[in-house]
Amino acid sequence: MYLDHGHGSQHASAHHQEQRQTLNIFPSQPMHVEPSPKGEISLAVLSPAPVGSKMPRSSPDHHQHQHQLQQAAMEELAGSRRQQEHHLAVQQQHQQPFAAEPAGVSKDVKPLAKKDKRGLSTSERDPKTLRRLAQNREAARKSRLRKKAYIQQLESSRIRLAQIEQELHSARAQGVFFPGSGLLTEQGVTGKGLGGIDGLSSEAAMFDVEYGRWQEEHYRVMYELRAALQQQLPEGELQMYVENCLAHHDEVVAIKDAVIKGDVFHLTSGVWRSPAERCFLWLGGFRPSEVIKMVLGHVEPLAEQQIVAVYGLQQSAAETEEALSQGLDALYQSLSDTVVSDALSCPPANVANYMGQMHVAMNKLSTLEGFVRQAENLRQQTLHRLHQVLTTRQMARSLLAVSDYFHRLRTLSSLWVTRPRPPPQDHQQPGDGAGAGGTPHSS
């Protein structure tokens, strides 16, 4: 038994070497990683005990010690595996291409830049601001639509006016008679010479078309204002309707300004108004002082400061009206004196003096444009100053009162024109009443 100790030792050593080589064939980590000396010892420990060992195989201490060594070796191998996996994961992350990274970053940055450009997001705004923004967008959209429709209607009206003028001129060339054209022809004035239709200038005809369009739009604006007032909307929302109505009144001032330059007599004559409205016409429109007096009954109760401001505005408007009326009377008197001058006798004794005097009269007539323009500015300023004095709800009621007043005048004119008239009586011929049953002329 002891004689074989050396051989057994060599056999055990060879067996231990073979066992180590067998285990290294299937390593638990990459081959380029050098195993630690501790790992070698663990593998050596895991090898079977050499032949001839003094510790018996069946000893409990031997099995317990071997089990502990195996458990420690397994934990060490598991830790090494986790480190290796972590190392490989880090390498894979560093090996990924960076080409897609700028695109991803740019995609993430764009929404932030957009949000910074807009300021607060929609969810961070209060409902009142959102409602106001929505109303502003809707009002802007409607304004663009009205402007587009107005331009289209204006263009179609121009085309229609040119067609009518062409038809009238061709009809005159064929000898067709038009009522009222005989007097103009006798005076050497034709529709073509006046630049319009039957003595109506092109500026006046265009004004009638544009004013008719404005009147239709006025009905819609007043309808929206009345509905907003009846719905008891807040002051902020009602203010938008009041400002829209004032802007609509400013539009008619611009329309009148165009015809003042072209044909001021058409505006002052009031032929574009209804017959009942002409009774209250003053320099092409209403008297501002009368409008203030009219709306006082619809804006009560007024504060003491408002009463003082409203009556002050009414007095200022009345004084300006009186000054314009006196200036207009002086213009008419001066124009009359110029026309009745002996230099304008017919036939003229001196043509040069005749034309010079007519030139003076024409210059005086051009002064009428300034009076009418001042009256329009007074009407516009009165409405805007009244808006500054009254509250939004009071101003809304005032605008509706003015609109209803002129609407009633137009209704009265329609009823007057369509009123039933008695049939015309037959006039008796001379001598018809002398017969039997005739009515004697004297008792």
Image (cartoon, grey):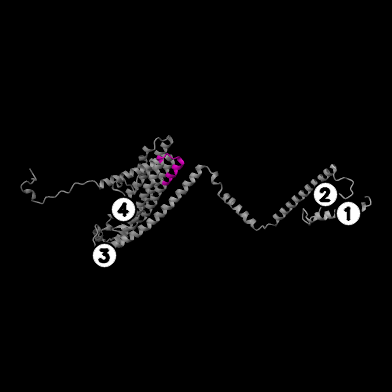
State the residue in front, 84 or 144.
Answer: 84
Alpha-carbon distance for marks 3 and 1? 143 Å
Residue ID for mark 1: 11
Residue ID for mark 2: 46
User: Please, what is the dominant secondary structure of the magenta stretch?
Assistant: helix
Alpha-carbon distance for marks 2 and 1? 17 Å
Residue 259: quadrant of the picture: bottom left
Label 1 Cα crowd, 10 Å radius (few <14 / some 14-19 / many 20+): some
Comparing labels 1 and 4, the label whose residue is closer to the camera: 1
Residue 263: quadrant of the picture: bottom left
State the residue in front, 286 or 128.
Answer: 128
Residue 366: quadrant of the picture: bottom left
Left or right of 94, for residue 258: left
Query: Is residue 27 shown above or below 232?
Result: below
Q: Residue 94 at x, y = what percent?
A: 70, 55
* Label 2 SS: helix
Query: Is residue 346 shown above or below 435?
Result: below
Q: Earlier in the sequence, mark 4 or mark 3?
A: 3
Image: magenta residue range: 229-244
